[in-house]
Amino acid sequence: MRIAIFPGSFDPFTLGHLDVLKSALQLFDKVIVAVGYNSGKNGFFPPEIRVEIIKKAIEGLKNVEVCAYEGMTISFAKQKGASCIVRGLRTTTDFELESVIAQANKKMAPDIQSIFIPSSHEYSFISSTVVRDVLVNGGDSSEFLPANVDINYFLNKRNQP
């Protein structure tokens, strides 16, 4: 079985992420969407809510697992038996950063490949940073998020004590 991990902070998971995931599913038997987090940092959404958002966004997709992890991505890939790390690209700047990370990962785990999947043109401008800015300022983020994700539900959940 060809297993890939698709790691990211996914804070929150956008239409661009979903687009890359759907492309990855055409190449692999199983894709693990891996929500990376650092316990020393506070994200906009806590990891457990990010996982919930992604599970809602991918309803109906087969052969996808969603989980959170902490630590090095390459270690997590080994733990999950993945042969590949999938990274989405929007711009040439993304490529420059991701290629450096891929080279470091290759040095640490020569048997795990990195594959870059460009997002479709209509999603190339969407980033989680932009979506968070829209959310913080009370704007409508629905054009950037999967249709079945009620972001207000998750915002309310985030704000509960």
Image (spheres, rainbow, N blue to C red):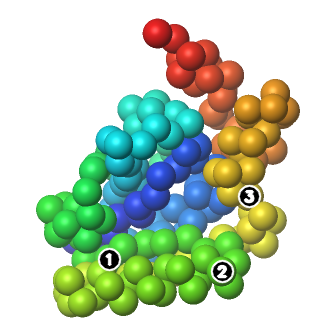
User: Residue 103 in the image: x percent, y percent?
Assistant: 36, 89
Q: Dots 2 and 1: beta carbons under 8 Å?
A: no
Determine which of the numbered discs, if any, sits on residue 139 in the image: none
Above/below status of 17 relative to 82: above
* The N terminus, quarter of image: bottom left
Q: Is residue 50 visible?
A: no
Residue sitting at the far top: 161
Which of the marked residues, 1 or 3, is nearer the chain's N terminus?
Answer: 1
Q: Quadrant of residue 121?
A: bottom right
Report, in whole angstroms, how far the alpha carbon at label 1 lies from the one at label 3: 24 Å
The residue under label 2 is which amino acid type?
Thr
| Snapshot quadrant of residue 89 | bottom right
Kindly identify the amino acid type of the residue bearing the numbered disc 1. Cys
Give the residue at mark 3.
126
Residue at 74% from the left image edge and 34% from the top image edge? 135
Please give the residue where the numbered disc 2 appears in the rendered image: 93
Closer to the eye: label 1 or 3: 3
Percent x, y for residue 24? 48, 70
Of labels 2 and 3, earlier in sequence is 2
* Disc 1 target residue: 84
Horizontal relation, residue 88 to residue 125: left or right: left
Q: Is residue 10 left or right of 153 when viewed as pictured?
A: left
Q: Nearer the viewer, residue 56 or 11?
A: 11
User: What amino acid type is highlighted by mark number 3?
Assistant: Ile
Residue displayed at 25% across by 77% down:
83
| Residue plotted at (81% across, 44% down) | 143
